[in-house]
Amino acid sequence: MGGTVLSGVPAISYASGERFTPMGALRAVAEFLGKDITYPWLMGISGAAFRGCWSDDWSLEMTYAAPEDVVLTGAATLGLGAENRLNESTEAVWEAIQRSLDDGLPVLSCGLAGAPEFCVVYGYGSDPRTLHVRSYFQKEEGKVPFQPWMGWHYGGYGRFPLVLLRSGASKEQDVHASLERSLRFSRGEGSLAKGAAKRGLHFGLEAYDRWVRALSEVEGDMEGKAFNMALNLNAFLDARRTAGEYLQILAAMQKEWRTGLLRAAEHYRHQVSNLADARRVLYFPRDLPEEAASQAAADLADEKRRTAYGRYLRAAKEEERLSLEWIEKALE
């Protein structure tokens, strides 16, 4: 059987602490390529650490928060170009995967294996057509049939990106401009947030308000609502933790920003503490978030627990607001 399998691509999992799967998968590729870069730096420079989203109706974008542009930005930091091959034919995508792997570059994708989470394709076989995949949902090496259209339409949530990487000159990111973009997005400003609102998605500070409001609308599918809240909390905790770590790194690099960024990082730490307190109110698993559904549903039915949960969310929003104010002061 013909094909190419790249050796040395690291495993990825929620247990690694790299819970935003687009950046976790990209960091794994960076390690394979021998590039020394940390997950918090990728989260920060791409803007992923400063994003948060709530969906009126369950949407994967709650946790991914428009991943394509952050993947492209993160890849550029690594000296990699990135191409989205989402809507091409199955044959064209297969040929592109082959070329990339034959050139020694893994492929990032979402929905090609297991649940619709970003994964790393590190090999292929030609007869039959199979892919070797590192996935957040596989504890060991995964070998799966090449079935892209099934993956891209997973659960009716729409098509998911297949991202091909290519070597290029390292592009140094403008940290000031990156933080300004992050501020706009964190406040729910800009064209991306406005466009998302038409689909029932709420970004930035407003996401906290919609999250609290959802606590009063718990009739119906309790497991589904509890599961959604667990996933959302998982995403916010990871993002805000890495945002604080990223700002501490920047404060050491940019002395003129030091005071403001350190104060912002302090408020992000407070926010993480509030979100962690919320996690103790409704059951939350140590590893895979989907395990939370049944036990969290019972907790969500308790009005006192919902009240406590909402109180922590409102406190987290206030810490978010203060963080953004200090970032803005640092950049003045």
Image (spheres, rainbow, N blue to C red):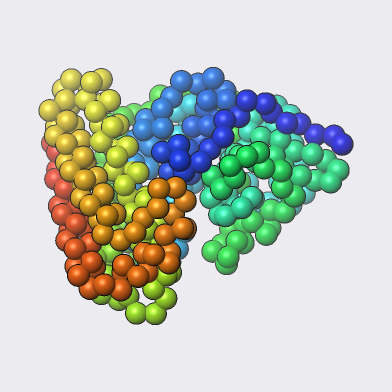
From the viewer's perspective, tell me whether residue 289 is left or right of residue 315.
right
Residue 313 sits in quarter: bottom left
Nearest the eye: 256 or 122: 122
Coordinates of residue 289 in the picture (x, y in percent): 44, 54
Coordinates of residue 316 in the picture (x, y in percent): 20, 52
Please say if 203 is above or below 237: below
Nearest the eye: 319 or 198: 319
User: Does residue 320 show up?
Assistant: no
From the viewer's perspective, tell me whether residue 332 is left or right of residue 249.
left
Please say if 30 is above or below 57: above
Residue 77 sits in quarter: top left
User: Does residue 28 show up?
Assistant: yes
Q: Residue drawn at (31%, 56%), measured in percent from left and top?
A: 203
Coordinates of residue 280 in the picture (x, y in percent): 27, 55
From the viewer's perspective, tell me whether residue 245 is left or right of residue 58.
left
Rendered-image quadrant of the N terminus: top right
Q: Residue drawn at (49%, 32%), measured in percent from left and top?
A: 27
Nearest the eye: 90 or 23: 23
From the viewer's perspective, tell me whether residue 277 is left or right of residue 29.
left
Rendered-image quadrant of the C terminus: top left
Q: Residue furthest bottom?
A: 220
Q: Residue drawn at (62%, 61%), measured in percent from left and top?
A: 153
Task: Tally the marks.
Answer: 0
Coordinates of residue 228 in the picture (x, y in percent): 40, 63
Q: Residue drawn at (40%, 48%), measured in percent from left and top?
A: 286
